[in-house]
Image (cartoon, rainbow, N blue to C red):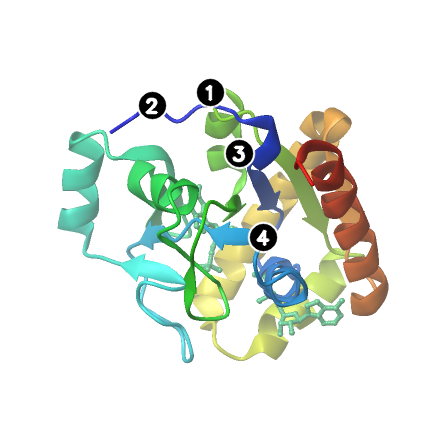
Amino acid sequence: MAPISADDRFRAIVFSGPSGTGKSTLIKRLFAAHPDLFGFSVSHATRKPRPGEVDGTHYHFVSVEKFEAMIADNAFLEHAKFGGNYYGSSKQAVQDVAEGRGKDINGGTAEGKRICIFDIEMEGVKQLKRSSLNPRICFIQPPSLEILEQRLRGRGDTDEASVQKRLAQAKNEIEYCKSEGKNDKVIINDDLDRTFRELDEWVMKDISKTTPT
Ligand code: ADP
Ligand code: 5GP
């Protein structure tokens, strides 16, 4: 497999921030707004699928044994444990997007070379910052921890123990963004339409600068 390197025209974009802050919602909108531009880095995860999640589109759902075998094979660009489960971005997933075999997060395929979009937590961000990928990084932050809790519970698909783990980790994610976000984009997801406009403007401004017309 060819080494993954930074290519300005197709520079990857990483979205990070506490679980429940609205990353998936915003990424789905971004894909819908620009159907031919992005491919999703479909992560591997050892947690159970939630209702509506499709294996191979939102995640590759795998066993702990399979995930650990992939770590041993050096198959991941980055990986981390979150809330007691493994999550990782495989080199293959990123290569698939670069070579036109990627996925659209709203279903379907992403044909042709696309800009790779990641949705990952902070340990993965640290690893990608040290990699040759040189991604643009956007932290999505909640207006407050109280609102984050409402959103996590309101989604209705996460059990109480998982909600508690996510809220505990949210504080670390918010602190990390304050210390590391200096050179990255930080967006507060308050009103969804307003937030999407800010995010879309930031994403597209750089793309129009770097993508040949
Ligand atoms: P994440 O991917 O960061 O875990 P989600 O996209 O699943 O978060 O969003 C968590 C919940 O919050 C979902 O029910 C979603 O519909 C809701 N949500 C997202 N953004 C907003 C917003 N700006 N205002 C109110 N609810 C929101
Ligand atoms: P969830 O279980 O809510 O889908 O995801 C939990 C957390 O794992 C989220 O913060 C999400 O961004 C993160 N995550 C999803 N995929 C990956 C991945 O491939 N690598 C890392 N490091 N984090 C991931």
State the image coordinates of residue 137 (x, y, percent, origin top left). 64, 36
User: Could you say which quadrant of the image residue 90 lies in?
Assistant: top left
Identity of the amino acid at label 3?
A: Val
> Is the CB–ligand 2 distance for label 2 below 8 Å?
no
Residue density around tag 1, few if under 14, some if 14–19, many if 20 or more, within 10 Å: few
- Pointers 3 and 4 in contact (C-beta within 8 Å): no
Identity of the amino acid at label 2?
A: Pro
Q: Nearer the viewer, residue 14 or 157?
A: 14
Residue that badge 3 annotates = 125
Q: In whole angstroms, how far apart are the C-alphas of marks 3 and 1?
A: 13 Å
The image shows residue 67, relative to residue 105, as above or below, that is: above
Instruction: Name which of mark 2 and mark 3 comes first in the sequence.
Output: 2
State the image coordinates of residue 105 (x, y, percent, origin top left). 49, 63
Residue that badge 4 annotates = 37
- Pointers 2 and 1 in contact (C-beta within 8 Å): yes
Residue that badge 2 annotates = 3
> Is the CB–ligand 2 distance for label 3 below 8 Å?
yes
Horizontal side of residue 180 vs 67, given as left or right: right
The image shows residue 15, relative to residue 145, as above or below, that is: above
Identity of the amino acid at label 4?
A: Leu
Can residue 191 be seen at all in this image of the molecule? no
Residue that badge 1 annotates = 132
- What residue is shown at x 48% (from left), y 77% (from top)? 157
Instruction: Name which of mark 3 and mark 4 comes first in the sequence.
Output: 4
- What residue is shown at x 48% (from left), y 52% (from top)? 39
* SS at circle 3: helix
Can residue 25 be seen at all in this image of the molecule? yes
Q: Nearer the viewer, residue 186 or 166?
A: 186
